[in-house]
Amino acid sequence: MKSYRKELWFNTPNRVALINITSQVEEAVRESGVKEGLCLVNAMHITASVFINDDEEGLHEDFLKWLEELAPHDPDRYKHNLTGEDNADAHLKRQIMGREVVVAITEGKLDLGPWEQIFYAEFDGRRPKRVLIKIIGA
Ligand code: ZN
């Protein structure tokens, strides 16, 4: 069995960002040499997400509006921010959008559905943060 590990680094200029990382994950699959296996992609920070959905601009705006309605960036609203942080909303947004995705690798390629794309979602950016890619298989 082969095993491959890679980190992707992000430092978004804005606090919130959605980034399509599908091509970077595909590149890691090529580097791994795995033809049949599994690919895990997870945010390594508790205020960011990795998720799969459509790469459609309107939908991305819908996601961000929906998340802002659920967990507004209001520093006075949350107990977590009594610690001196201001990112409670980012923790809540990450929890809804998820920590990781697992994608099958078939014949050396990500076995995604027709409209599935992999995204990194940043909810508390403007500092270096990592995504882990772990690939296992043969
Ligand atoms: Zn925090």
Image: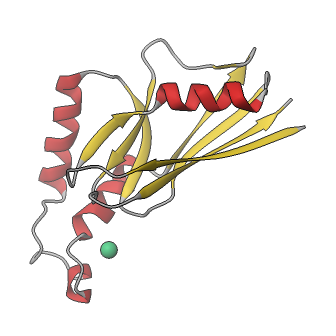
Q: Residue at x 60, y 27 (%)?
A: 27
The reply, left or right, for residue 30 in relation to residue 46 is: right
Residue 105: quarter of image? top right
| Whether residue 110 is situated above or below residue 28 in the rendered picture | above
Q: How many marks?
A: 0
Q: Is residue 88 left or right of residue 69?
A: right
Residue farthest to the right, as pictured: 1
Q: Is residue 100 left or right of residue 5?
A: left
In the depicted structure, whether residue 20 falls above or below residue 98? above
Identify which residue is drawn at 51% across, 58% down: 44
The colour mode here is secondary structure
Tell me residue 61's x, y (percent).
16, 34
- Locate residue 129, reporting x and y percent: 42, 57
Q: Quadrant of the image for the N terminus? A: top right
Position in image of residue 29 (x %, y %): 67, 28
Q: Is residue 37 above or below residue 65?
A: above
Residue drawn 58% across the image and 25% down it: 26
Estimate the x, y position of residue 46 in percent, counting from the top left. 42, 64
Regarding ligand 1, which quadrant of the image does it lie in?
Answer: bottom left
> Is 136 on the left-hand or right-hand side of 96?
right
> Quick one: 27 or 84, which is closer to the camera?
27
> Who is closer to the viewer here, 133 or 75?
133
Residue drawn 48% across the image and 54% down it: 130
Between residues 1 and 76, which one lies in front from this camera angle? 1
Give the position of the C terminus as an image quadrant. top right
